[in-house]
């Protein structure tokens, strides 16, 4: 009798497992088709029965706000239920939630523990995120060797973020023997997957020539790829390279197009560059007032070079009225930020003011009073 009951239970279990998988697949199809209500209903039914995959998917719905109102607390709760059943992706999500304080109080120690579990269970994102904790010393002591090991494992499994981390480690010798060639190989793999930080780092390496041989053509090519992703820093640098003829012929019109794209994202360097183009009349009709307007936007963001340029404008009454106090304040800000020439210009400004006052006094003395 007991053997018959065990056989019946075994047969029932074999029947229920495919049914659960069928229900999950059906819910996934509903979700992918935008039928979120149906998907939620099926996920919730399975999750209430303890299905870890369904628990994880409910967490994803609450986390993304796709199909449900965003609710980070509920997302973390469902992630936890799945994570406690050993679900690697849920363990990663829960670790990230603790790292960033999303839906749970920020706790670097809890973040480390859950990301370690995710990484040990083969989750690529978990391996990448764990590497970053070792890299930064968050939730554990900094260990660049362990960071490099986890970056390497995740990078070999195709993580673009890990490839960026591994490439950087090789490039700068962080936890690995410095190997710029290998670093550029991994960064290129990441960049070819659309990893924006890799595109920018490759571009800056070729631009500066600090670790690899300077190559403005390659630098411009990679900056343009980053700019195509909407990165304001890259858009501004492409504008500068077209303006200065680096890696290409000078093209002020194209330069201004890129500056305006970056400036539209409140990039202060681009705003300053537009102002200087208007001052010089390069690619646009010369206009001192328009120049000052753009430079002021950059100076309002505490850009030291813009503060210097705007200070000179107020000091000379160029594109705006003469204003000694504003000029002196801006030049002092620039001087404190080690902008070359700012201290000298402040001295000249003071001398000029004294000369103005002396001329005024002389005029009053020489004018007959009625």
Image (spheres, rainbow, N blue to C red):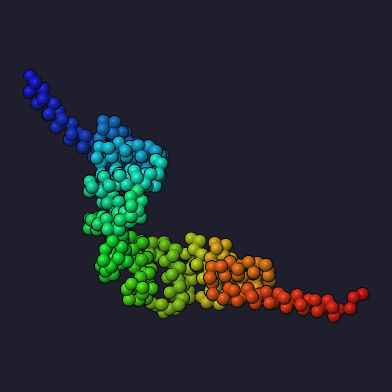
> Is residue 366 visible in the rendered structure shown here?
yes
Q: Where is residue 78 drawn, in percent x and y?
A: 33, 37
Residue at the spot 32% in from the left edge and 47% down from the top edge: 112
Residue 227, compared with residue 73, is above or below; it is: below
The image shows a total of numbered marks equal to 0
Q: Is residue 314 left or right of residue 19?
A: right
Q: Nearer the viewer, residue 102 or 51?
A: 102
The quadrant where residue 35 appears: top left
Extreme-right residue of the structure: 370
Residue 88, compared with residue 257, is above or below; it is: above
The quadrant where residue 165 appears: bottom left
Residue at the spot 38% in from the left edge and 69% down from the top edge: 204
Q: Nearer the viewer, residue 51 or 370?
A: 370
Quarter of the N terminus within the rendering = top left
Q: Is residue 3 left or right of residue 134?
A: left
> Is residue 318 visible in the rendered structure shown here?
no
Quarter of the C terminus within the rendering = bottom right
Q: Is residue 323 left or right of residue 246?
A: right
Residue at the spot 39% in from the left edge and 47% down from the top edge: 100
Q: Nearer the viewer, residue 45 or 204?
A: 204
């Amino acid at each position: 009798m007991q053997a018959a009951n065990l056989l019946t239970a075994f047969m029932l279990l074999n029947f229920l497992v495919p049914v659960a998988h069928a229900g999950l697949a059906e819910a996934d199809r509903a979700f992918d088709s935008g039928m979120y209500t149906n998907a939620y209903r099926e996920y919730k039914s399975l999750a209430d029965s303890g299905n870890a995959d369904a628990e994880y998917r409910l967490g994803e719905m609450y986390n993304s706000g796709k199909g449900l109102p965003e609710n980070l607390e509920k997302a973390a709760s469902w992630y936890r239920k799945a994570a406690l059943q050993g679900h690697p992706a849920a363990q990663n999500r829960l670790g990230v939630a603790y790292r960033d304080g999303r839906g749970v109080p920020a706790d670097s120690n809890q973040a480390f523990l859950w990301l370690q579990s995710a990484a040990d269970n083969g989750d690529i994102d978990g391996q990448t995120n764990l590497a970053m904790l070792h890299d930064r010393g968050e939730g554990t002591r900094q260990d660049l060797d362990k960071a490099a090991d986890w970056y390497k494992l995740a990078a070999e499994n195709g993580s673009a973020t890990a490839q960026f981390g591994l490439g950087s480690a090789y490039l700068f010798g962080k936890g690995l023997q410095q190997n710029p060639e290998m670093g550029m190989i991994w960064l290129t793999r990441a960049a070819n997957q659309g990893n924006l930080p890799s595109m920018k780092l490759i571009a800056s390496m070729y631009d500066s020539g600090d670790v690899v041989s300077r190559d403005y053509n390659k630098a411009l090519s990679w900056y343009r790829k980053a700019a195509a992703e909407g990165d304001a820093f890259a858009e501004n640098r492409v504008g500068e390279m077209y303006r200065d003829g680096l890696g290409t012929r000078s093209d002020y019109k194209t330069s201004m197009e890129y500056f305006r794209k970056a400036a539209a994202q409140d990039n202060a360097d681009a705003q300053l560059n537009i102002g200087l183009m208007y001052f010089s009349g390069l690619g646009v009709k010369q206009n001192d007032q328009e120049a000052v307007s753009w430079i002021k936007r950059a100076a309002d963001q505490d850009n030291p070079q813009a503060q210097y340029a705007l200070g000179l404008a107020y000091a000379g009454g160029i594109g705006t009225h003469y204003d000694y106090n504003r000029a002196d304040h801006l030049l002092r800000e620039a001087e404190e930020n080690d902008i070359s020439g700012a201290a000298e210009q402040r001295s000249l400004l003071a001398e000029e003011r004294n000369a103005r006052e002396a001329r005024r006094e002389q005029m009053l003395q020489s004018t007959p009073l009625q």
